[in-house]
């Protein structure tokens, strides 16, 4: 069964450093998402991406964040200058047709900012 | 208006019992209501979802009940098993404007005792 994959599974970085979280969505999906989950809290929407551009973003997704689909398979989230409060699980998700279809989640990347 | 309120925060059920988790929303533009199951260290996995044109959807031991007028929906797990022990999230999503993203409840930690 096709699945969303994410790398790395765990990333430790120092405050102020840049990190890139990588995702490979399901191959025939067209919509891509990033969510984050701070430990013990609810899942929060960050951004959605379709047709090589951002379609929605939350207030959390400020200028330190960016997303990119550098090739036909990868979908990346870059955090330019990490802060302690960016420590969280980051989940990538994909779907076939936006709001009309289910989103499938990857296993997540645990980001720890020290 | 964007909130989804979920209760209870935690739930302990005996094997064979019925687990019931409730969610309420305010935004009448929401038209897709999924439930996700999350095991420790894993990403959320879609369990079952409903749209407001039906009042109930059943898949195996899992049933969603939906009350459009009350803006409430619930997950029932029949014959609960220890393997059902996980965190369950309800979510809601619309199909237009800034509603095209999953808004999540806070989660319910379910423990099924053998």
Image (cartoon, coloured by chain):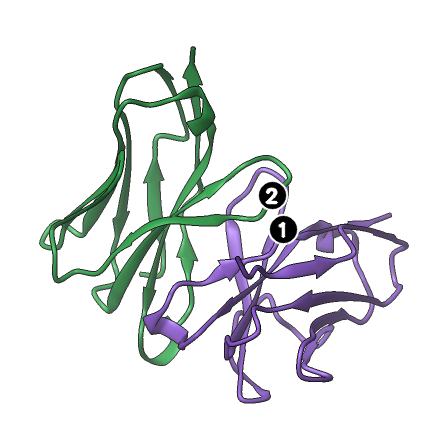
Instruction: Name which residue lies at 31% across and 75% down.
Output: B95
**Of B70 and B95, the residue lying toward us:** B95
Work out whether residue A13 can be spotted.
Answer: yes
Quadrant in the rendering for residue A60: bottom right
Q: Spot the green chain and give its letter.
A: B
Residue A81 is situated, as x and y percent measured from the top left of the image, at: 83, 67
The chain under label 2 reads: B
Q: Nearer the viewer, residue B101 or A60?
A: B101
Drawn side of residue A104 relative to residue A39, left or right: left
The label number, if any, that marks residue A107 in the structure image: 1
Is there a contact, CB below 8 Å, between mark 2 and mark 1? Answer: yes
Reply above or below: A52 against A21. below
Vertical comparison of A56 with B52: above or below:
below
Residue at image coords 11%, 51%? B55
Q: Quadrant of residue A83?
A: bottom right
Kindly identify which residue carries mark 2: B42
Q: Which chain is purple?
A: A
Q: Is residue B57 above or below residue B9?
A: below
Judge from the rendering whether residue A7 lies leftward or rightward of residue B14; answer left or right.
Answer: right
Residue that appears at 89% across and 64% down: A17
**For the point 42% across and 62% down, which residue is it?**
B102
Give the percent coordinates (x, y) of residue B92.
33, 58
């Amino acid at each position: 069964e096709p699945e969303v994959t994410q790398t790395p599974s765990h990333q430790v970085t120092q405050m102020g450093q840049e990190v890139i979280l990588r995702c490979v969505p399901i191959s025939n999906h067209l919509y891509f998402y990033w969510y984050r989950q701070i430990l013990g809290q609810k899942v929060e929407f960050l951004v959605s991406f379709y047709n090589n551009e951002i379609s929605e973003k939350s207030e959390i997704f400020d200028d330190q964040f960016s997303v990119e689909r550098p090739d036909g398979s990868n979908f990346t989230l870059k955090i330019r200058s990490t802060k302690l409060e960016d420590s969280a699980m980051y989940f990538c998700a994909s779907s076939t047709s936006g709001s009309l279809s289910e989103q499938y989640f990857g296993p997540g990347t645990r980001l720890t900012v020290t | 208006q964007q909130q989804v309120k979920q209760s209870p925060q935690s739930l302990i059920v005996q094997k064979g019992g019925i687990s019931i988790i409730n969610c309420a929303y305010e935004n009448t533009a929401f038209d897709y209501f999924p439930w996700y199951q999350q095991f420790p260290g894993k990403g959320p996995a879609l369990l079952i979802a409903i749209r407001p044109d039906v009042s109930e959807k059943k898949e195996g031991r899992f049933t969603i009940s939906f009350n459009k007028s009350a803006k409430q929906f619930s997950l029932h797990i029949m014959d609960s098993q220890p393997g059902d022990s996980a965190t369950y999230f309800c979510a809601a999503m619309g199909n237009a404007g800034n509603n095209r993203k999953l808004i999540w409840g806070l989660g319910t930690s379910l423990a099924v005792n053998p």
